[in-house]
Amino acid sequence: MAACSISNINGQIRYSVPEEIKKGSLIGNIAHDLGLDVQRLRSGRALIVSGDSTEYVELKTDKGILVVKERIDREQLCAETTPCSFTFEIILDNPVELHHVTVEILDVNDHSPTFPKDVIHFEISETATPGARFQLGSADDPDVGFNCIQNYIISQNDNFILKQHARQGGAKYAEMVLQKPLDREQQPRLSLIITAIDGGNPQRSGNVKIEVNVLDANDNAPVFNQSVYKAIVAENSPTGTYITTVNASDADSGTNSLVSYSFTNMKVISEIFELDERTGVIKLTGDLDYEKAKKYEIDIEAKDQGGLGDSAKVIVDLIDVNDNAPTISIMSFFTPVSEDAPLGTTIAIFSVKDVDAGDNGHVVCTVDQNIQFKLQSSLRNYYSLVTDAALDRERVAEYNITITATDSGSPALSALKTLNLKVSDVNDNPPRFQKSVYTTYVAENNPPGLSIFTLSAQDDDWNQNARVSYLLDETTVGGSPVSSFISVNADSGVVHALRGFDYEQIKSVHVCVKAQDGGSPPLSTNVTLDIIIQDQNDNAPQVLYPVQTGASVVAEIVPRAADVGYLVTKVVAVDVDSGQNAWLSYKLQKATDRALFGVGLQNGEIRTVRQVTDKDAVKQKLTVVVEDNGQPSRSAVVSINVAVADSFPEVLSDSKGRC
């Protein structure tokens, strides 16, 4: 069954549907009525939120329609309240839109009138005069409007007619009016049928049987001293609280003047109030709830022993107390939020509600102070939680945001809702080294593949944005690419030597390495690694002078008149190593006459250590060892021929003579 009517007033959509409509029945084309494209419903992830009785409707976003989700019983939903409706909101995001929808439930005639009792007994004196009234009360019909009770009829009889009345709320009730006096001797008992008929189509009806026992002599009916009694009571009043006292008097005497009081609308009233049938005192026996009922209208009947009676009404008004805390309903919550989200980014949309009245239902919302968020409200009781400052995941990775809703009652009641918001990472931090330049030392002649250093960069970002790779910047060393000397492991940052270094060729290698993260786009930082090659004692000293040719030639002549300390010659040697590996010392290893010559330990100077004599041989042969200071040390040997003579011919003559 389709919706009966559609209206759009001030941005609100209103539909009307009859109760008991089948599941799946169309309520309305929400997309058309809101002027939205069906695609917008899908892309905006439209959903029903924050509504009363939202279980009754379903949003078909693929068709843009609202349909009935569950059976709707108007009487269960609204009882006697009319018109009967429920409201809800439809929310869309990207951008956020909020639309209010009201669905009015139309009554159908699905209930028959019923009387509180199956049989009503009256004892009526035969002296009752025409015009005497006998209260029948009212039948109950949960339907409303024209579907509720419209008429009462009485079965055919000679004594009574039926009169109908309407109470202040519109409910109709009936009373029997004596038209012709009773005659107990002719008819001591009467059986009548009262029928209540509603106005539905088809009509429904309900019956009650009236049994009249005719008595003698009671000719005065009780009369209330007020037609309406009023009382005021707080909704949190305890059981036993006094409400009021009703009073009716009867002009008769004796037992005919005894009056008893009773409720005529027993269905709900007797569960909440208690009436003393003798004293007329009304007390509270049940729980009151202002949010369910703001007032009660109690129909009271006073009867004497002869069945004559009168009716009155007691109106009990309830005073609201602050007994309901606000409720917070989260409609949308967007987590995680990117750390580069602009100010004013919506984090959550929520509504607050307090079913109390007046100030007790006025709600104020706040959010934690000293955090990066604030509340905005453009609609009553609807709020958006938005960013109020820049976010930084590296400083705070998640927030527990507490929303507090407080009413204006005394004492005030409040509700809390905590949202756990996670901040997602963006690549806004480059890798960083602790230093801009690192220095490491490698001994020469190292084996290829030697791990010589480990570079480590930290990235404050997260996950892929913090995954660091190490890349070697291609430069040259001595005309060769640095990658032929050095490699860097991209994942671990370990630096390896690809070949052995020779200190005598390369003293140091300067390497530039880039640390790059895995973000998009990636961020990077450069660092310099200075690799200092350390010398090893891998070279022996080299004798530069005297030059060794292999021929036995007199190299130096010492005159016989030479004094002590005469400089014969000087051994000159070098060592291409460095440091102590190149510190040289000179020692006399062999000599024809060790007592005649000495060698300077540091300078290699060969000098006479005593006066030359005629007895000294003309030819002297010296062997000098040149030794470095390495560990272990390396050495070179040089042979030196020295002639002790005053002239070169003398040397030659001595040479011939010896031949």
Image (spheres, rainbow, N blue to C red):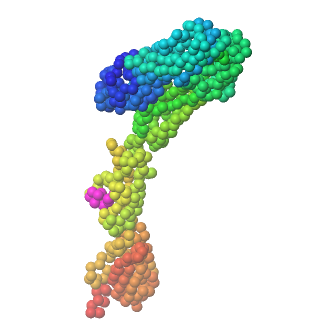
Front in this rendered view, residue 109 or 118: 118
Q: Position of residue 89 (x, y in %)?
A: 42, 26
Q: Is 97 drawn above or below residue 188 in the view shown?
A: below
Coordinates of residue 104 in the picture (x, y in percent): 41, 21
Q: Tell me if residue 482 is in the magenta stretch.
A: yes
Image spot of residue 237 (x, y percent): 65, 26
Where, by quadrant of the figure, is residue 175 drawn? Answer: top right
Q: Nearer the viewer, residue 101 or 520?
A: 101
Q: Does residue 645 show up?
A: no
Q: Residue, x 33% and y 63% (percent of image)?
A: 497
Residue 26 in percent (x, y) is at 33, 26
9 above or below 646? above
In this view, the residue farthest toward the front is 185
Q: Quadrant of the N terminus?
A: top left
Snapshot quadrant of residue 187? top right
Residue at x 40% of width, y 88% of height: 593
Between 438 and 658, which is closer to the camera in this rendering?
Answer: 438
Figure quadrant of residue 62: top left
**Quadrant in which the C terminus is drawn:** bottom left
In the image as oriented, which residue stretches furthest toward the right? 254
Q: Could you say which is closer to the camera, residue 359 or residue 491?
A: 359
Q: Residue at x 55, y 32 (%)?
A: 415
Total number of numbered discs in the rendering: 0
Residue at image location 61% in from the left, 28% down from the top: 287
Magenta stretch holds residue 487: yes
In the image, 307: left or right of 253? left
Q: Which residues are magenta?
A: 480-488
Q: Is residue 596 left or right of residue 303?
A: left
Q: Is residue 597 visible?
A: yes
